Image (spheres, helix red, strand yellow):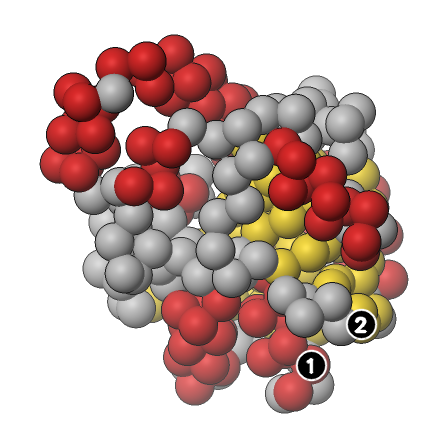
Amino acid sequence: MITGIVVALPEELNTLTSNRLEKGQVGHLAVKIRVVCSGAGPENARTASELLITQGVNQLISWGCAAALDASFRPGDLVLANSCVDAGHVMFDLNNEDWLVHAKSCLAEYLTVRTYTGKLAESKSIVASSHDKAQLAQATGAIALDMESVAIARVAQSHGLSFLSIRAIADPLTMDLPKAVSHALNDQGDVVLGKLLTYLLRHPAELPGLVRLGLYFHAAKKTLKQIAKQLDVVTTLP
């Protein structure tokens, strides 16, 4: 089996490899593992998934960070989805029980954080407020949220491929994301450093929130780096 991994952001990509990839460029992590940096959002993720399939991939992984929709989740905790709900609140199962069981078994002895299995929700844009996250959790029953996994899962289903989400929690349910984050995003979903710094100069009170988010993101990346060391085993079902 050849595994394709879709990663939205360069900061998430560097948990897998030190090599830089341009948006839409396919890289090789191992003989049977491909990766592409898609950019943020479902449309970018869908395009990247289809690209990987043209490269001979026959199972897909959504890799990166997620927002918690459960108050007990902490930064760095791992979420492995067994079902999804899209932005229109349409729910569907992933039928990936064998891969889920295998992945959890492989990672159990290596991870120092908690692993959760449940429903993963889709958002077309950043959900910044704790209030909005709580409402989404209540409406969908999802335990975590990201912008790409559902699109990747849909592509996998349409091609009859296996799918696995590997998502580490970066922002807890109770956290309101700093407004600087949304302000600094461009139309492709990438953070523009110049816009971020300009916003901070005008709104210095945002800095503590950004520092806290940076610490949480570091915890999520630490978990992803631990998993990356076991990718050969995780992606090879017995």
Q: Residues within 10 Å of mark 1 (few under 14, many from 20)?
A: some
Tag 2 residue: 92
**In the rendered image, which quarter is residue 67 located in?**
top right
Which amino acid, mark 1?
Gln
The residue singled out by tag 1 in the image is: 157
Percent x, y of residue 50: 46, 81
Please tell me in which quadrant of the rendered image residue 191 appears. top left
Query: Is disc 1 placed on a helix, strand or loop?
Result: helix
Q: What residue is rendered at 37% in x and 63% in y?
A: 38
User: Which of the 4 image quarters holds residue 171?
Assistant: top right
**Image side of residue 101 versus residue 132, left or right:** right
> What residue is rendered at 72% in x and 49% in y?
136
Residue at 57% over, 70% down:
152
Marks 1 and 2, Cα distance to the nearest angstrom? 10 Å
If the image is split into quadrants, where does the N terminus sit?
bottom right
Given the image, on which type of amino acid does mark 2 rest?
Phe
Q: Nearer the viewer, mark 1 or mark 2?
A: 2
Locate residue 80 relative to residue 125 in the image: left or right. Answer: right
Q: Are marks 1 and 2 in contact (CB under 8 Å)?
A: yes
Q: Which residue lies at the image location 64% right of the left edge and 48% below the top edge?
A: 145
